[in-house]
């Protein structure tokens, strides 16, 4: 075998000089091309495994094995994650840029690129409704407590009674069964002439 024409190590099969197939490369074509190689079939060089068509979005390197850093994404990792992404370093998905840890306050959407203008309005509206309802409740309680008296309370007031005081308690009436003869009595008749 001729060493110049037969490089097993680099993906050629001796004597037939056939290249690696099925997205493989290297010695005896045992290594697989990266699934992140660009293009329809993720093809790579059968000698060194470098991707022919660059990398899929979100990956870097000659073999497309390195994902974008935490704050970049997209084609060749040239796009920067939205500053409104929550969490450390405004981290986002390396392929599509969707924020990994949600959004900072006041923003929403998969990339936190939509300003939430209605959030303060909803909060303020709810606070207003709750405050208004509580105010009406307190005012109603005050009106009921200090409001006009009932007709029976007005009659009792005319008779000199305090509210809730009953007539029976005002006077000590004697028990008729325990009465004795009076010590003094008037025996003269007013009709004697």
Image (cartoon, rainbow, N blue to C red):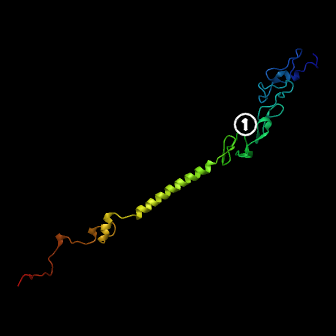
Q: In the current view of this chain or complex, which residue is farthest to the bottom? A: 193
User: Measured from the top left, where is residue 122 in percent x and y?
Assistant: 58, 49
Give residue 62's position: percent from left, percent from top.
84, 32
Residue 165 in view of the camera:
no
Position above or below: 49 against 99: above
Q: Residue at x 27, y 68 (%)?
A: 167
Q: Which residue is mark 1?
A: 96
Q: Quadrant of residue 142?
A: bottom left
Q: Is residue 177 above or below residue 102?
A: below
State left or right for residue 147 relative to residue 24: left
The x, y position of residue 40, in whole percent, is 77, 25
Residue at the spot 64% in from the left edge and 48% down from the top edge = 117
Q: Nearer the viewer, residue 139 or 91?
A: 139
The C terminus lies in which quarter of the figure?
A: bottom left
Residue 64 horizontal/vertical position (percent) = 80, 32
- Mark 1 nearby-residue class (10 Å; few <14, some 14–19, many ≥20): some
The residue located at (82%, 26%) in the rendering is 44
91 to 134, vertically: above or below: above
Q: Nearer the viewer, residue 37 or 7?
A: 37
């Amino acid at each position: 075998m001729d060493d110049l024409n037969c490089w097993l190590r680099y993906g050629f099969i001796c004597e037939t000089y056939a290249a690696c197939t099925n997205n493989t490369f290297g010695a005896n074509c045992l290594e697989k091309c990266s699934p992140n190689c660009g293009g329809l079939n993720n093809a790579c060089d059968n000698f060194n495994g470098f991707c022919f068509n660059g990398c899929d979005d979100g990956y870097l390197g000659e073999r497309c094995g390195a994902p974008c850093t935490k704050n970049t994404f997209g084609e060749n990792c040239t796009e920067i994650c939205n500053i409104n992404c929550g969490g450390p370093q405004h981290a986002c998905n390396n392929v599509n840029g969707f924020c990994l840890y949600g959004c900072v306050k006041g923003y929403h959407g998969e990339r936190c690129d939509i300003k939430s203008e209605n959030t303060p309005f909803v909060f303020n509206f709810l606070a207003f409704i709750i405050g208004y309802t509580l105010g009406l409740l307190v005012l109603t309680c005050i009106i009921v407590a200090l409001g006009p008296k009932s007709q029976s309370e007005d009659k009792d007031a005319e008779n000199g009674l305090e509210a809730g005081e009953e007539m029976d308690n005002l006077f000590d009436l004697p028990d008729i069964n325990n009465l004795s003869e009076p010590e003094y009595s008037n025996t003269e008749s007013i009709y004697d002439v």
